[in-house]
């Protein structure tokens, strides 16, 4: 029917949070692929969004996290639902 299916849980550009610290918001920049034995994994390259409430958005350091270590950002999820 022409619709797009997302096979990856968090596409590039998604706002997420670290499961350990949900007060910070991160932007998905890229994917890191790895293989252990016969299993394939996708890790996420993230940058922290700093000061996103003004006309200038600043970004923090880049880090790599596993899918199990991130969750949807509360603010980003609300925006997705409203749009």
Image: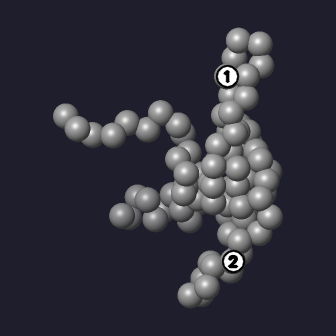
Where 23 sits versus 7, above or below?
Answer: below
Residue on which the image places disc 1: 40
> Residue 47 at what x, y percent from top left?
71, 61
Residue at 77 percent across and 19 percent down: it is 36
**Left or right for 8, reference 33:** left
Residue 6 percent across, percent down from the top left: 43, 38
Task: Classify mark 2: residues with Cα within 10 Å, few (<14), some (14-19) or many (20+).
Answer: few
For this rendering, which residue is in front, 28 or 33?
Answer: 33
- Residue at 61% in and 85% down: 56
15 to the left or right of 68: left
Which of the image's four quarters has the N terminus?
top left
In the rendered view, tell whether residue 4 sits above or below residue 76.
above
Residue 76, above or below 5? below
Residue at (23% x, 38% y) in the render: 2
Instruction: Indicate the quadrant containing the C terminus: top left, top right, bottom left or bottom right.
Output: bottom left
According to the image, what is the colour scheme of the structure? Answer: one colour
Name the foreground residue: 83 vs 65: 65
Residue 34 x %, y %: 73, 29
Q: Is residue 42 visible?
A: yes
Percent position of residue 75, x then y? 56, 65
Q: Quadrant of residue 24?
A: bottom right
Which mark, residue 66?
none
Q: Say above or below: 58 vs 20.
A: below
Tell me, for residue 58, which label it has, or none. Answer: 2
Q: Earlier in the sequence, mark 1 or mark 2?
A: 1
Front-most of 48 and 38? 38
Identify the element where label 1 is drawn. strand
């Amino acid at each position: 029917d022409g619709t797009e299916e997302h096979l990856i849980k968090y596409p590039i550009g998604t706002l997420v949070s670290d499961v350990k610290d949900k007060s910070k918001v991160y932007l998905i920049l890229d994917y890191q692929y790895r293989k252990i034995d016969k299993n394939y994994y996708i890790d996420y390259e993230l940058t922290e969004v700093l000061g996103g409430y003004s006309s200038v958005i600043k970004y923090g350091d880049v880090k790599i996290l596993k899918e199990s270590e991130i969750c949807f950002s509360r603010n980003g999820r609300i925006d997705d639902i409203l749009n």
